[in-house]
Amino acid sequence: MFQLFTTELFTTELFTATECLTKLIIPSPFSMVESREISEAGVSRTLFRLGWPMMVSSFMHAAYNLVDMLWLGHLPGEEGRFAIAALQISWPIVFFMISLGLGLGIAGIALVSQYTGAKNREMANRSAGQLLSLTLLLSILVAIVGFLITGVVVRSIGADAPVTIRATNYIRIIFLGMPFMFSFMSFTMVLRGYGDTITPMKIGLVAVGLNVILDPLLIFGIGFPPLGVRGAAIATVISRAIAAIPALYLLFSGRVGVHVRPGDLKPDGKVIKKILSIGIPASADHTANAFGFFVLMYIVARLNSSTIALAAYGIGDRIINMMFIVIDGLAFALTIIIGQNLGAGRIDRAMQAARKGIGLMFCLLLASSVLLYLLRRGLMGAFTPDVETIDEGINFLRIVSLAIPFFGIFRGVGAIYEGSGHTVPAMILGLSRLWVLRLPLCYWLGLHWGLQASGVWWGMALSNAVSAALALGVYSTGIWKKKVIE
């Protein structure tokens, strides 16, 4: 009897807490971007109206790793260098598994946005339900497989033993939290397709705030033994769990534009086939990229002074990713505009948005790369006191910043094809950029020609410039102008 009472009490309290939280995070009608505005208002204005919450969301995702890097980099002695290097070689492995679900999420944006543009709310809801079912099942599989193979995969990179041990501990904990990550990812993609980019942002802010608080407590062991790298992973999993609970509640409660009902979770062969036809190429693109970055870590790990190179690359890469926050927000906004306008039959509007989106991303990254070049020493010094890591990081930023603006073109074209649901051309572009250009260039310039770290950094820069030209060629074919819904 007591057990029944306490269970009911816990359920009631959880429901009440979730209800209170949703009152804070559900946007007002005036804070969302309506379908009419997406199809008719000024393109640049709409891009930023849709994009700014996603810029904040991108910042929050980057903040998970950025905060981890900041705290871990200030661990005493060589521990800080080992921890940063461990975090850097961990990311490609984790991203490889995340990418399996990310492709399905892109399919969710394409379908929900196009059905919303076509005023077919029932199919938008059904698509959201099918996406949620698929990603939850996939997340459980990813968590199990990832946990089991982590040790073997990390050791195959060939990093120093202290780095390998710390990376293995970090990744295994992250994999245990995959169902929470995939649930919130599905929620975010579905609401973005509908045009609501604010609600996911608000939930994410709460999660990141919690992560910021937990990180130093768990890493340095304030009040209990320090956990180091494992503490950073535990903080991330807890904060993502806090984000997933209200996200699922909102989808099933109907308190946001998309309302998933239990019947929408029942397998629907036609919808699943459509999700997979769009999502598998997108997943293949992202997983191949993630595996490519794993190979890149393998190359960097074979440079002279590999731990220094890994640490410098890890910090420099996080700094550059912070620059991409605005670009990611605009890219997702462009995806929504393309999808809803194609669904509504407004090809002229979609073409106008495509041209302005690509141009805007290029110009913003051009300005940002100039600033990065000028501030490179101070930025590196903020993350670590290690002089050798700072010097190599300055070298990395000096070379890579030259080609950063070209990534704006590449990212814009990819967003256009993802919004239209034609993910195969986007997949081909992604594979070409990494596997045809970046990895061979990094290997030949860095190891074969003996340029070491500088050669690897030049390979990254050249791959960005050439892939931008390829992306413009693919864009000009116009394949993206055809919608994928009936």
Image (cartoon, grey):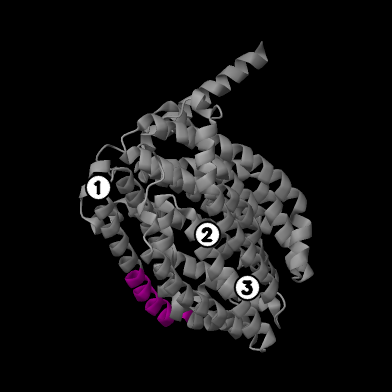
Q: Main secondary structure of the magenta part?
A: helix
Instruction: Measure how far apart labels 1 and 2 are at the Cα level.
Output: 27 Å
Q: Nearer the viewer, mark 2 or mark 3?
A: 2
Check disc 2 and report the residue beneath it: 427
Check disc 3 and report the residue beneath it: 311
Q: Is residue 252 in the magenta section?
A: no
- The 10 Å Cα crowd at callout 2, few under 14, some 14 to 19, many 20 or more, is many
In this view of the protein, which residue sits in the foreground, 61 or 433?
A: 433
- Residue 311: image x %, image y %? 63, 73
| Image point (61%, 19%), residue name | 7
Magenta residues, start to end: 362-378
Check disc 1 and report the residue beneath it: 39
Q: Is residue 429 above or below residue 457?
A: above
In this view of the protein, which residue sits in the foreground, 77 or 410?
A: 410
In this view of the protein, which residue sits in the foreground, 71 or 460?
A: 460
Q: Earlier in the sequence, mark 1 or mark 3?
A: 1
In this view of the protein, which residue sits in the foreground, 422 or 46?
A: 422
Amino acid residing under circle 3: Ala
Q: Is residue 339 left or right of residue 310?
A: left
